[in-house]
Amino acid sequence: MAKETIAGLAKRLGISKASVSYALNGQPGVSEVTRRRVLDLAEELDWYPSASARALSRSRAGAVGVVLSADPLLIGTEPYSMALLAGIETVLAEGDMALMLRMVGRDPAQERATYERWAGERKVDGVLVFDHLLDDPRPALLDRLGMPFVLHGAPETGVPPAFSGTTTDHAADAATIVEHLHDAGHRRIAHVSGPHRFVHEEERVRGVRERAAAHGMVVVQYEADYALLAGHDAVMTLLRAREEPVTAVVFGNDLMAMGGLLALRGLGVRCPDDVAIVSWDDSLHCRLASPSVTALSRNPGTQGRVAAGLLLALLDTGLVQAESMPHSELVVRSSTAG
Amino acid sequence: MAKETIAGLAKRLGISKASVSYALNGQPGVSEVTRRRVLDLAEELDWYPSASARALSRSRAGAVGVVLSADPLLIGTEPYSMALLAGIETVLAEGDMALMLRMVGRDPAQERATYERWAGERKVDGVLVFDHLLDDPRPALLDRLGMPFVLHGAPETGVPPAFSGTTTDHAADAATIVEHLHDAGHRRIAHVSGPHRFVHEEERVRGVRERAAAHGMVVVQYEADYALLAGHDAVMTLLRAREEPVTAVVFGNDLMAMGGLLALRGLGVRCPDDVAIVSWDDSLHCRLASPSVTALSRNPGTQGRVAAGLLLALLDTGLVQAESMPHSELVVRSSTAG
DNA sequence: CTGAAAGCGCTTACAG
DNA sequence: CTGAAAGCGCTTACAG
């Protein structure tokens, strides 16, 4: 059987292609009776309009792009990204948009090349961008390319916002964590953060420092890179310091917290008795660890849904808006229960 | 600046659209000089041919689809899938194919609807299918839809194969695991598998049973569903049995192994001294666990690359072939080191 | 409400 | 090697 087309349907029904098109797309210009006949026939034939023909005539790809740029070694170990992606996909599917996924290493050039290609080929109608950097070149690049985008984890850029994005109150998250540690009696803590080139890390560092200062607590900052080993090394370095040791360590993600835990175990340092631990991301790792690790749950699924919603709105109406994320929640477990 | 088109390039260069097209696509029909001029201009203008126009005239979408059907709760906790996807994407990108991703719950109807939609709209040129089921309806469905596909983890269907797919020698994997446990002195073991509706689980169950029988070992089979809790419950049930208890448990994936480990811990049963543990999937969880867990490393990245390669070959040449996966490797850790 | 026609931006026989 | 033209399968003003 040859592939059915809109012309075929029109002929079968004895009407014009235009009427079929109007009927399918819910446009005015056809009687209800005709519309029903068209829809019924399409259903009966299991027929859908060609995506590429539609894309060409509408000048709309019907797809949204996401570049996941992650260290190959970390891929799949960060549940946060997958949950985020799942949230995104849910909303896109509801909006009849496909998700085009590209995975590249931590290589800005490849991410950039992908956007240029997608824009040039008009392969996607917009993109979702993650992990805002200091002096991030991507917003300017995407603007130049005329590619609509939503930046997930954007900085506040004033009112009206410079571009669409989701914002997280990292200061509030920092306060939640610091308060928890302060209540548990800690006065000297360390903060093992991700790379400071990420804007959200900078904000977290400042948030922790300020909140701790308000309580007269000492904070030792340590910049790392989210990897398991980095967390391990951080703890080795921190505990080897000649000064009075810290009694709690806050890690920028779950992997580093796991690495830190392994380091403590190796050193024979008890957790939480000697050193307490908090992770800035919750995950199964934190639940399964021994001791289980207190963690900030950030609802990645919801975040993905919100971000995708912003992009669909931007594509439909051109509305640029910033939306703040729901508050994170601290899940208290054994690692700070001392 | 209005969007450049092939007609625009042709006019600028004073040649026909056809020549530009031939030049861009490496077709014969243009002189080398002309070809260079075209390519140089395209590069200078940062221009790419429209994906949808190209798709329409070639009757080829330039994309491959993947439906990830996973329990929302498990999403992101199974590193296997992400690594597989990364492998797939790498090969697709090299072949200039986009990856279209759809995530649905464990709902066969939604997966089916997605394939029908994709086929009807000709939105993708082919799909990669995972987790072969007993009486799997998908091969027949995709055949009926005229949608090329590769089944990752396919059964042997004879020579020539009934469809393209990758096969894994689960019997060999089972043998590897059983031999390891036998060498360590175990004579009574349990096998906590995933659902038997998955063909690969059926093959594993048989593989374990047969190899164990060859050594006169006793195997207690327990069917579960890959979830953390299922592993936990399995151990509770197994150790509550009135008979002589097993001394080792093989789990169908890393999550269940973690659940099992937690159960042992809760019961005060020592691992590996009282009960040893093996996971049929390796992951960070296994590395981080306490004790670290012996696991079968299955190279999901390589598997993804092979599967994607098969699909590209099928699309290019129509060649239907089955390829067997590289052998798995047992990573021995503390959980069986007793 | 309906039909004939142009247009979206490519590819590809076909004639020169 | 090059050019004019048809075709891919839709959408959308425009006339009737």
Image (spheres, coloured by chain):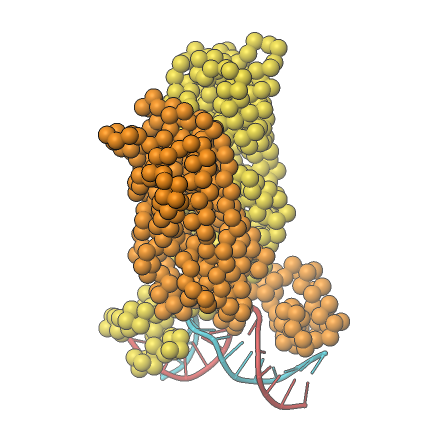
Chain colours: A yellow, B orange, C red, D cyan
Query: Image height check: is A6 above or below B286?
Result: below
Q: Residue at x 43, y 35 (%)?
A: B181
x, y (%) of residue B171?
42, 49
Tally of numbered discs? 0
Q: Residue at x 32, y 65 (%)?
A: A26
- Report if residue A212 is visible in the image: no
Left or right: B231 as drawn, with respect to A118:
left
Q: Residue at x 46, y 52 (%)?
A: B168
- Report if residue A37 is visible in the image: yes
x, y (%) of residue B327?
51, 48
Nearer-the-camera pick, A52 or A68: A68
Task: Locate the C terminus of chain B by quadrant.
Answer: top left
For this orientation, the residue located farthest to the top is A244
Nearer-the-camera pick, B104 or A182: B104
x, y (%) of residue A103?
54, 48
Q: Residue at x 50, y 20 (%)?
A: A265
When asked about the image quadrant of residue B13, the answer is bottom right
x, y (%) of residue A330?
39, 25
Task: Locate the N terminus of chain B by quadrant.
Answer: bottom right
Query: Image height check: is A221 above or below A44?
Result: above
